[in-house]
């Protein structure tokens, strides 16, 4: 991915003089009420703007794919290959549906996520048990206040008995000097070791909630394919949003006992449904993939 200069070298030889951007397209931003903005993308070319071997002509613009973001480079990274998310179709044929679908999947309400815990294992559900009450190992502290230390220490201390080949925690976003939450645009990275047949599971707090947490599905993320080769790339589909069942839910980011709003641990009322369960899309409106992207990279 690279920025074009004023003179573009052609694949078949020769070069092409690119008109000034201002003679082809104009973008204007107009603020409105309630933090809204109108972005106008206007084709300002004329029938003589583009000089070709077949004569002069106007510029054509395709339908627009857009994203509102806080992190840098939501569509492409200069100097890096195309991400394979649909930008190639936009650039080559003006078809933006694939890229728009990817961006919609990755869009949602921003929330910080807390430091978390991880485990490498073979048997499912190393961190929680669906349909059962919290196991009392520290998941409640993680899901309600983002305190991962209790659960981390519990699984590290009982790893052998629980059949976990590797355990630990993560608490410092990439590029940051101090431990803390990962806010929109931040990321945690962890390095694990495993063999074919093993999976990795992790859990981290959904920051703006009472007791929701992001976690891998019960079986975890398989580190190897069925053929025994290391998996790589996007594995966000192996993730879900769960309710720990320890505190009654309030409006996300607004309720007085959610995340940073709460006066202290255990400030909210008890949940009458005392069991860990997946938060359905009908209840929240977004899948885990609207908040997080999880990737595997073999070393």
Image (cartoon, rainbow, N blue to C red):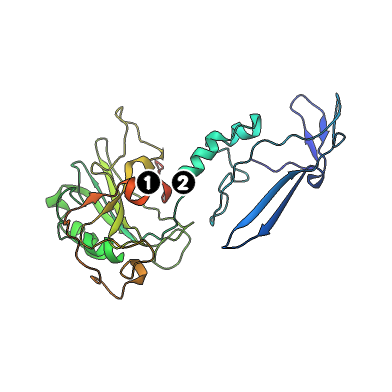
Label total for image = 2
Q: Report the residue that reaches farthest toward the front.
A: 33
Q: Point out residue 285 in the picture as x, y percentages from the top left corner.
A: 38, 48
Q: Point out residue 91 in the picture as x, y percentages from the top left corner.
A: 65, 34
Q: Quadrant of the N terminus?
A: top right
- Please give the residue where the numbered disc 1 appears in the rendered image: 287
Sequence-wise, the earlier of marks 2 and 1 is 2
Q: Residue at image x 57%, y 62%?
A: 35
Q: Residue at image x 45%, y 51%?
A: 108
SS under mark 1: loop
Q: Quadrant of the C terminus?
A: top left
Query: Residue 38 sits in which quadrant?
Result: bottom right
Does 79 sit left or right of 206 as displayed? right
Q: Point out residue 34 in the picture as x, y percentages from the top left corner.
A: 56, 63
Give the camera-side residue of 295 and 18.
18
From the viewer's perspective, is residue 97 above or below residue 281?
above
The disc placed on residue 180 is none
Q: Point out residue 176 in the picture as x, y percentages from the top left corner.
A: 46, 64
Q: Does residue 101 show up?
A: yes
- Circles 2 and 1, Cβ within 8 Å, touching? The answer is no
Does 269 sit left or right of 230 as displayed? left
From the viewer's perspective, is residue 5 above or below residue 140?
above
Q: Does residue 84 show up?
A: no
SS under mark 2: loop
Give the camera-side residue of 144 and 226.
144
- Please give the residue where the numbered disc 2 appears in the rendered image: 106
Query: Residue 50 sits in which quadrant?
Result: top right
């Amino acid at each position: 991915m690279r920025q074009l200069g004023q003179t573009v070298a052609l694949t078949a030889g020769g070069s092409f003089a690119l008109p000034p951007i201002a003679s082809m397209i104009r973008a204007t931003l107009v603020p409105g009420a309630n933090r809204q903005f109108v972005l106008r993308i206007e084709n300002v070319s004329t029938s003589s703007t583009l000089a070709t071997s077949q004569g002069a002509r106007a510029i054509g613009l395709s339908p627009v794919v857009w994203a509102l973001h806080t992190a840098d480079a939501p569509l492409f990274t200069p100097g890096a290959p195309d991400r394979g998310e649909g930008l190639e179709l936009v650039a080559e044929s003006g078809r933006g549906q694939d890229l728009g679908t990817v961006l919609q999947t990755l869009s949602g309400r921003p929330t910080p996520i807390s430091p978390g815990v991880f485990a490498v294992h073979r048997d499912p559900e190393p961190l929680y048990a669906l349909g059962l009450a919290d196991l009392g190992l520290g998941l409640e502290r993680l899901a309600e206040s983002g305190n991962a230390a209790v659960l981390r220490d519990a699984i590290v201390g009982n790893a052998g008995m629980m059949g976990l080949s590797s355990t630990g925690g993560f608490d410092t976003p990439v590029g940051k000097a101090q431990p803390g939450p990962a806010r929109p645009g931040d990321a945690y990275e962890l390095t694990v070791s495993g063999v074919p047949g093993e999976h990795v599971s992790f859990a981290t707090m959904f920051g703006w909630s009472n007791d929701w947490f992001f976690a891998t599905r019960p079986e975890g993320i398989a580190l190897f394919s069925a053929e025994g080769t290391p998996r790589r790339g996007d594995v966000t589909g192996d993730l879900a949003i769960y309710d720990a069942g320890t505190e009654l839910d309030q409006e996300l980011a607004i309720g007085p006992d959610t995340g940073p709003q709460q006066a202290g641990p255990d400030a909210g009322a008890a949940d009458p449904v005392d069991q860990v369960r997946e938060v359905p899309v009908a209840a929240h409106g977004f899948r885990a993939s609207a908040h997080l992207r999880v990737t595997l990279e073999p070393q």
